[in-house]
Amino acid sequence: MLLNKPLTSPITTHNLIVSGFHALSDPIRISVIELLRQRELCVCDLCDALEINQSKLSFHLKTLKEASLVNSRQEGRWIYYSLNISQFQVLETYLAEFRLNSGLLSPRSCGE
């Protein structure tokens, strides 16, 4: 198992890790994450801050939601987005295991 404390099945955890890093691979989505670090925002505020149209933003928000990196809630006709910190913790734990295990692996020769 990749994580010390499995939140879901290994396959689901693997998919969340893959989709999480994929979602973080785009500059617009990183900008969305940076804005949401400060506070919850509605789509119109995100569009204004990023200077992009709602259609383009919706595509990126969908990717972030599918990766479980953001939460959404509807209030009236507005949808508000916030960070899903627990998913960032899954990614952080995954990366931390590389650091923790890096000293345990000894070099080996090809063919061993």
Image (cartoon, helix red, strand yellow):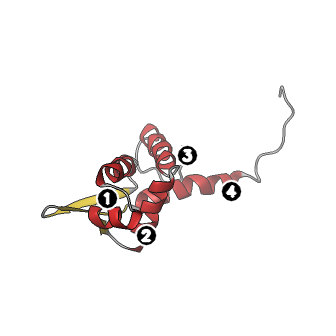
Residue 72, placed above or below residue 10:
below
Q: CA distance from mark 3 to mark 4?
A: 13 Å
Query: Are the two marked residues, 3 and 4, in contact with CB atoms closer than 8 angstroms?
Result: no
Label 3 crowd bin: few (<14), some (14–19), many (20+), radius 10 Å = few
Q: Earlier in the sequence, mark 4 or mark 2?
A: 2
- Extreme-bottom residue of the structure: 38
Q: Nearer the viewer, mark 2 or mark 3?
A: 2
Which mark is on residue 2?
A: 3
Q: Nearer the viewer, mark 3 or mark 4?
A: 4
Q: CA distance from mark 1 to mark 3?
A: 24 Å
Q: CA distance from mark 2 to mark 3?
A: 27 Å
Residue at image x 38%, y 47%?
Answer: 63
Task: Provide the secondary structure element on which disc 3 rests.
Answer: loop
- Extreme-left residue of the structure: 76
Q: Earlier in the sequence, mark 3 or mark 4?
A: 3
Residue indicated by mark 2: 37
Q: Quadrant of the C terminus?
A: top right
Residue at image x 33%, y 55%?
Answer: 53
Task: Provide the secondary structure element on which disc 2 rests.
Answer: helix
Q: Earlier in the sequence, mark 2 or mark 1?
A: 2
Q: Earlier in the sequence, mark 1 or mark 3?
A: 3
Left or right: where 107 falls relative to 67: right
- Residue 45 in percent (x, y) is at 31, 67
Q: Nearer the viewer, mark 1 or mark 3?
A: 1
Label 1 sits on what residue type?
Asn
Residue 40, placed above or below residue 16:
below
Residue indicated by mark 1: 71
Label 3 sits on what residue type?
Leu
Q: Nearer the viewer, residue 24 or 96?
A: 24
- Residue 38 in percent (x, y) is at 41, 74
Q: CA distance from mark 1 to mark 4?
A: 29 Å
